[in-house]
Image: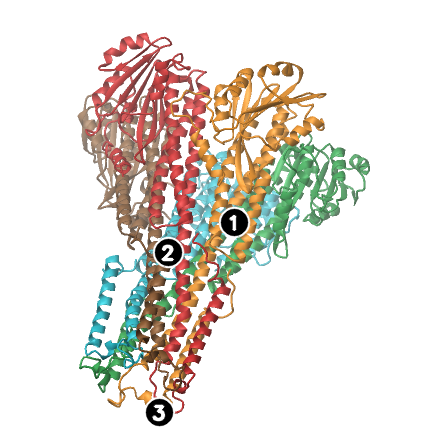
Chain colours: A orange, B red, C brown, D cyan, E green
Amino acid sequence: MSQRPKRKRSLRRRQPPGTAPGTIDVDPSWLKSKVSVIAYGPDEVVERPLTGTKELEPLLARFPVVWINVDGLGDADVLREIGAAFKLHRLALEDVVDVSKRAKVDRFPDHLYIALVMVSLSENVLVTEQLSLFLGKNFVITFQERPGDGFDRVRERIRGGKGLIRKADSGYLAYALLDATIDGYFPVLEHFGERLEALEDSLVASPDTNMLSEIHGLRRELVVMRRAVWPMREALNFLLREGSDAFSLETRPYLNDCYDHAVQLMDLVENHREMASGLMDVYLSSMSNRMNEVMKVLTIMSTIFIPLTFIAGIYGMNFDSEAGPWNMPELKSPFGYVVCLAVMVTVAVVMVFYYRRKGWIGMPRRDP
Amino acid sequence: MSQRPKRKRSLRRRQPPGTAPGTIDVDPSWLKSKVSVIAYGPDEVVERPLTGTKELEPLLARFPVVWINVDGLGDADVLREIGAAFKLHRLALEDVVDVSKRAKVDRFPDHLYIALVMVSLSENVLVTEQLSLFLGKNFVITFQERPGDGFDRVRERIRGGKGLIRKADSGYLAYALLDATIDGYFPVLEHFGERLEALEDSLVASPDTNMLSEIHGLRRELVVMRRAVWPMREALNFLLREGSDAFSLETRPYLNDCYDHAVQLMDLVENHREMASGLMDVYLSSMSNRMNEVMKVLTIMSTIFIPLTFIAGIYGMNFDSEAGPWNMPELKSPFGYVVCLAVMVTVAVVMVFYYRRKGWIGMPRRDP
Amino acid sequence: MSQRPKRKRSLRRRQPPGTAPGTIDVDPSWLKSKVSVIAYGPDEVVERPLTGTKELEPLLARFPVVWINVDGLGDADVLREIGAAFKLHRLALEDVVDVSKRAKVDRFPDHLYIALVMVSLSENVLVTEQLSLFLGKNFVITFQERPGDGFDRVRERIRGGKGLIRKADSGYLAYALLDATIDGYFPVLEHFGERLEALEDSLVASPDTNMLSEIHGLRRELVVMRRAVWPMREALNFLLREGSDAFSLETRPYLNDCYDHAVQLMDLVENHREMASGLMDVYLSSMSNRMNEVMKVLTIMSTIFIPLTFIAGIYGMNFDSEAGPWNMPELKSPFGYVVCLAVMVTVAVVMVFYYRRKGWIGMPRRDP
Amino acid sequence: MSQRPKRKRSLRRRQPPGTAPGTIDVDPSWLKSKVSVIAYGPDEVVERPLTGTKELEPLLARFPVVWINVDGLGDADVLREIGAAFKLHRLALEDVVDVSKRAKVDRFPDHLYIALVMVSLSENVLVTEQLSLFLGKNFVITFQERPGDGFDRVRERIRGGKGLIRKADSGYLAYALLDATIDGYFPVLEHFGERLEALEDSLVASPDTNMLSEIHGLRRELVVMRRAVWPMREALNFLLREGSDAFSLETRPYLNDCYDHAVQLMDLVENHREMASGLMDVYLSSMSNRMNEVMKVLTIMSTIFIPLTFIAGIYGMNFDSEAGPWNMPELKSPFGYVVCLAVMVTVAVVMVFYYRRKGWIGMPRRDP
Amino acid sequence: MSQRPKRKRSLRRRQPPGTAPGTIDVDPSWLKSKVSVIAYGPDEVVERPLTGTKELEPLLARFPVVWINVDGLGDADVLREIGAAFKLHRLALEDVVDVSKRAKVDRFPDHLYIALVMVSLSENVLVTEQLSLFLGKNFVITFQERPGDGFDRVRERIRGGKGLIRKADSGYLAYALLDATIDGYFPVLEHFGERLEALEDSLVASPDTNMLSEIHGLRRELVVMRRAVWPMREALNFLLREGSDAFSLETRPYLNDCYDHAVQLMDLVENHREMASGLMDVYLSSMSNRMNEVMKVLTIMSTIFIPLTFIAGIYGMNFDSEAGPWNMPELKSPFGYVVCLAVMVTVAVVMVFYYRRKGWIGMPRRDP
């Protein structure tokens, strides 16, 4: 439910055709921007909220890597100011607020613009959010639609100073953020996988008409996942081919690893989609088998009783047996009733035997 | 309705096989051409209707960019005159009137020919129109089938002199027009998205046989959209690869941005198509579930009452119980009727119990 | 009907496996060959039937372009003679008579071999014919299976001397013939499009079981069209890439235009195929909706009357109400019949109400 | 039937995982190898069975082309001996006996290894056989699983000395054998085409439940054909691109012709597959239309008679009309019976009219 | 059954997003690692368990090839120690324990990392296991999830000293292990093929509702196979293109052979998938044919008896024939009963004749 309105909004924010490019046009309903900065080098870390771009100068001078994170896209001024401070390209800035939720990489002369889609689950509903990342010589700027992200472990690695991150350059930080974003897909896909398997189990146990909308819902969400994953793989591929000079030689194998993870994601998504299609097939067949079962019971009951009822009808007719010797003499026979019942039983037994031979009755078969 | 006749007409206008190439053959039913010109430079703008090509000479001499817009393709002479004045290639001119509604880019030695399809909605019906654009060193010529377009904001940007447009060259104007054309697809797709979601909601609420033609209609229109979008992406790709020397270095990133939008469009169209297919599946399954429901009610009613009616039939037979002791002595028994009713109730209860165990009766399940 | 036998024949004419390549093996049932020649230059045109290859020498010496057209492939000798006179490659000559109906281009050192498929409609049935075209420095040779073609307008352009054709070289003539062949597809496709739309209209009005074979027939013919169009596009692409040196610089843009038309054809064919698939879906759903309707009527009628008939059956039983006070005392009650009828009416009303609430009865819905 | 066991066998012959490469491991059930040799030059031909590799020396010295043909793969020694005499690569020799039935081309420093699949029909069942061909400077070696092949016409061309073959080198012989193998597919495909058309005709005439397994069988065999044809095209393409230096300049256009035939085959196979899918659709729809027909008859009969029977049931009730004036006074009316019959007829007529208006009864429509 | 929990586990082992790359994080439930070493040269072989990396020094000095095999990934320390001893890249080591079951090849400056998936059958259930292989100048290191593999024949070839393996370098050993892994797929696929054919046979004999879950299960397992085979082919392709310098010239054709086998596998998997889809179609059609059969019997029985029962009902009505001459005079006629029976028989015969002409009754047709 919560995912549908969002998609609508992202479309509604689109500027009217013919608007000048680079126009930064924010939605008044969006969250106000909150800017924070982490600046670090091998030996020290500074972490604090940012109130103006003037504070940046000394940080950029003192630290090899400055990471500015903006949560909420509601303040066009904040965006413009940061854009001006780092000379970010106006088209990239437009893309930050035009949350099309499509991964892409744009190369500008002195910085890279990387857009990715972050996925998470909120009360079992898939939520997508656009991450916009600018990578420059000594800075990384990230824009997110909402506060709350999967980067806390990266922040801890920076604070803790363990691993490579403090010794490495801004490219490595960008890699770490991309990697965390991509790795954030796995728990979501795992969740879908579990739902698919639960659905499969209950489908085998007892197919049910409201499984239809569940399968349909899962397929829709997998379509969203696929739309998120495919461009991500392309974007990473582009990054590896065209943008690798923004990354040091040591960082490149890590980027490659990222790409491998994206390929794995694609594999998983396609696999889940195939499973969902298979479930749909099984659901439809189960339903149709059920109907066959219903029809069989109807047929057996009807066809056994129809001739019997007819026979009973015959002897319920009121022809006057007094009127002539051919008028229902059976009714007067002392064994008429017994013979009649015997005929009925015989007919019924023959029918049952016939259906059993046809395989319609027999071993009590469980619904598939 | 209005879209189908149009497609037919565009086919009917085709010249007979074997006609000499470059023949400009207009349909007498088309709108008469109305030509207007906007010429501008950084400092001034002139905007007026054009009555003859002779007026162009001084404009071309005075302004860095001259934009001639032709609404209506009904005057072959106007086209020929403009073609002659700007030395446009005869094959391109033929394409202008041969409204095949397929985006393409042709490079000629001193100008580019770009054909795009403009889409709009007229009373919720998809309307397509061909935009033919010639881009030369200092001119842009656009041909449209009908007056009314999405370029008013571009005209205002020219008049207002804000943004880059007045300072830039003809390539930037061409980009601005392409961009406006492409951005014009988004509201149309949004409209389809909303119709799809409305359809999905009402499908979940109560599936209905006339949804079939609605889904079918949507799929047809999405096929038209796809046929429009795919070649557009190809044409823009070709423009980026082969025609980029007609654009200044500053304009190229903007063209790239255009291409990104076309890719997004493709994504959306494919997504909508997938949604429509999914809806079709859900519709079919819902219908089949409905039928199952119907069959189940029929089966339950029939199979419960069939044996009861048979029993009633038995005791409606007229065997003469006087004729012998075996002839329906039950009829004479003082408790015959009560026992008979009791047997009937027992049979009915057993059947109901059996169906409940089979899961055919039970929780009153809503139609999916 | 007429198209199926043809396909069979073209397969039957195939030479047995292991035959030496270049064997010219004609089918005795084929039409005798009729050869005609048109030779022209900027100033004069000669047009006459050809009786022997000796007549060619002076024509080739005098005119810049000589076009030899052969209708009917029944004379192996004629083919061999022409092959020898122009030194045509034996494999290409074999392809002329091995009418595989697949467009292709072969480059030989001093001539090009181009095979295309011409389509036309004969009494609303798709007819395909192979056109084999040899293009040399100053000659064009065309082979057709049957007389009658779409080249009359080209001949008139040669005779009339209007346009470029008389001034241009043999490459331009080849282009004009290719162009006429390709343009000949459009009316055929238009015909299919009209049949599809007529079918769609009547499907919406009243689905019918014999529409199935009509849709199936259309799909088959569209498969044939597709098999003709795809290789044509490939062949033209090959011609543009590899064979363009056989065409003058002025002719190449025209060839490009041909290629664009082939792409448009492909688009149309795919579009029509998709429409046909959509129709099939709609047909199947309509049929299944119809069945649902039938089932609903059956269910409603049956389930309303089944309990009523059972009640009637109860009171048709012959239990002797004299035998005891529990034996059907209702029969003796003065209001028994009225109460019984009242119960029946109540049951019927309740059922109707129940079905109406379920949505099975209600607004009289039209078949979709 | 005969094709399925074969596939199993070819899998069973596979060596256990981990076996050293190049192991020649024959199946004891295979036919013993029979080796024959044809050696020829422009002037003379020698043709005889081969008993040992020592006989080869003088032949290779005297003739420009030596063709050794081995029928039956049952003797590992024969294979090893020939492999040693011509220095064939051990992996290629392993492929000869590991009959995977997949076309491929391997280039070794001084010879080419070409594997193709030969198809034929044995009592209307598709039979596949692997042809392994080694092409060296002055020799061609072919290995076949069984005696009997489509090469007799090639042998006759060698014996007869007509055409190019005697004057050409070993590459031309290899081409001739490839060409004969590929051309051997056409009659098989033609056979499938005829079966498809026969099936289609009888499907239109009277759909039948056992057509299902026929269509299924055809589709399975077409899958086998496709698996044979696709790699063949790839192998030929590889041969044209990478292996063409093993062929003289004169032979290359012929190889190209081979490739064209493979492409035609692919086309035909895909076409047949599409036809088979179409038939399946038509079969399913016909069956479902049949069912609709059945349901309609059931519904019409039931719903017409159900109310009539109910009315009869009413007047079969035994309410005592003596007990009171409201107890079935109709029974005593002199026109009760006539009025009752009239009501029944009216009900029946109304129902028939209603169904006719719904289009369920009417023009006696033939089953599609 | 056993395959599903495994997939879940492999996902659950994934590290939380944002973890530093190269973290070796083992699952406590995994098997403890058991390390063994085989070192060999042309003349001698040493084979023993390994207790510490210090033992490796002398082996590496003395033998040209050292193969270390690790069964079980439960000891992070063992992995780290081996990683340190051979300077394996941390990302590759992370991949060893992050058992994503996706084949890949990574090139590092002084070693190659190759991940493959080994498949086997355990009680007819598909079991997959990741094989991680490091190939360096004079060593091969393999990591497996569980003891037991398909490499025993390779070990025997090393011990026995037959074939090339003892004389060759570490690249040849890596090839031998890859080859054994790939060849291990064939028996598994053969098993699936047999199950498919058994299913097909029993489907033709008597379709059954629980075949649905069998077909579904097979399709799921084939999806797993496909996910294993596709990346393997890609990985081998990458190895051939980019990593071939790690292999000697003599080994490369063998690698090529491996690649061919992977392509064959893909072919088989796709073929099996197509067969499974075909089976699903046949299953569904059979089920629907069955239902048609059921419906036909119901229709025939119902429609024959419905009018007969109605006639019996008519003469069961109690209209008082004394009340007037029009009140059921038939009941008094001496031949009333006989005529009535005759009418019934006539109606029944007419219906049977009608259904026979419609083809609904007739030749007793077997279920397909």
**SS for callout 2:** helix
State the image coordinates of residue D68 (x, y, percent, origin top left).
53, 47
Q: Are marks 1 and 2 in contact (CB under 8 Å)?
A: no
Q: Inspect this view and state whether residue B6 appears.
A: yes
Q: Nearer the viewer, residue D320 or C361?
A: D320
Left or right: residue C70 compared with residue B113: left
Amino acid residing under circle 1? Lys
- Give the percent coordinates (x, y) of residue D8: 54, 56
Instruction: Give me the C-alpha separation between circle 1 and circle 2.
Output: 64 Å
Q: Which residue is mark 2?
A: C357
Front of the two marks 1 and 2:
2
Please tell me whether residue B180 is drawn above or below residue D200 in the rendered image.
above
Residue B99 position in % (x across, y down):
28, 29
Residue annotated with mark 1: D101
The residue carrying pointer 3 sits among few (fewer than 14), some (14 to 19) or many (20 or more) residues within 10 Å by Cα, namely: some
Tell me the CA gap for discs 2 and 3.
Answer: 53 Å
The spot of residue C182 in percent (x, y) is: 29, 34
E173 and D44: which is toward the camera: E173
**Quick check: can you spot residue C10?**
no
Q: Nearer the viewer, residue C130 or D63?
A: C130
Q: Are marks 2 and 3 on the same chain?
A: no
Q: Which mark is residue B323?
A: 3
Q: Is residue A60 above or below residue E98?
A: above
